[in-house]
Image (tube, grey):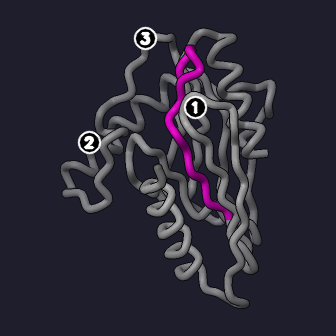
């Protein structure tokens, strides 16, 4: 369903001539995601949402959260995919989402992959896990290719260990040529 959402976001951006995004809510027992469309093609993503520093001061964190709230008000869910947000429930967990623009792997809070009406989107990395494996969806900018790779994890591997492995996979992906 996540791969379908990535593909749909590109189609909807061109069809509606607006910025779209796949927006993940990674906190809580039940994680959610939705494909959403923005106000118009001239919408500019606030710098606070692009230049993310995972070690931020309280003021930087507040500025990012405020920018996120303002942006969220400008986006509406694309109802053709689902009336509600799509739920991800145990035993499956999204470990995190990262893009090459941010250069950060975001394991909690909200994370979005933005697509412009031209079809341009940032390269994206999404790590999903069960107790037995990690699945990584990656898409490169300016292509419709989405790759899916699986990585075994040790039996009864803790969530923290799977998160660390996903973060390492993200760093490797960032450094690929």
Q: Residue at x 44, y 62 (%)?
A: 171
- Specify whether 67 is left or right of 128: left
Residue 157 painted magenta: no
Q: Residue drawn at (33%, 30%), measured in percent from left and top? A: 46
Residue furthest out toward the front: 177
Mark 3 lies on a secondary structure that is loop
The location of residue 127, given as percent across then percent down, is: 62, 60
Q: Give SS at disc 1.
A: strand
Left-right relation of 84 to 168 = right
Q: Depth check: give the residue in front, 168 or 95.
A: 168
Image quadrant holding the N terminus, namely: top right
The quarter holding residue 34 reads top right
- How far from the left and from the top, in percent, is residue 138? 62, 49
Which numbered disc, 3 or 1, marks the residue that appears first in the sequence?
1
Viewer-closest of 91 and 10:
10
Judging by the rendered image, the residue that carries numbered circle 2 is 63
Q: Mark 2 or mark 1, which has the lower sequence index?
A: 1
- Place of residue 98 in the rendered image (x, y in percent of width and height, measured from the top left): 49, 51
Foreground pick, 15 / 82: 15
Q: Give the magenta part as a residue range.
A: 116-128
Dominant secondary structure (helix, strand or loop) of the stretch shown in magenta: loop
- SS at mark 2 in the image: helix
Q: Which residue is mark 3?
A: 42
Identify residue for label 1: 21
- Rendered view: 42 above or below 37: above
């Amino acid at each position: 369903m996540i791969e379908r959402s990535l593909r749909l976001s590109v189609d909807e951006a061109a069809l509606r001539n607006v910025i779209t995004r796949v927006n993940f809510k990674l906190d809580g027992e039940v994680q959610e995601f939705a494909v959403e469309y923005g106000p118009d093609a001239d919408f500019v993503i606030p710098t606070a949402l692009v230049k993310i520093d995972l070690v931020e001061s309280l003021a930087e964190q507040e500025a990012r959260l405020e920018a996120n709230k303002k942006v969220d008000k400008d986006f509406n869910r694309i109802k053709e995919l689902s009336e509600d947000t799509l739920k991800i429930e145990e035993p499956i967990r999204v470990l995190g989402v990262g893009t090459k623009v941010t250069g950060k792997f975001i394991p909690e809070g909200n994370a979005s992959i933005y697509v412009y009406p031209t079809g341009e989107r940032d390269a994206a990395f999404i790590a999903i896990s069960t107790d037995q494996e990690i699945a990584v969806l990656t898409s490169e900018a300016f292509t419709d290719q989405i790759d899916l790779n699986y990585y075994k994890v040790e039996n009864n591997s803790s969530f923290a260990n799977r998160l660390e492995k996903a973060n390492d996979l993200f760093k490797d992906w960032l450094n690929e040529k």
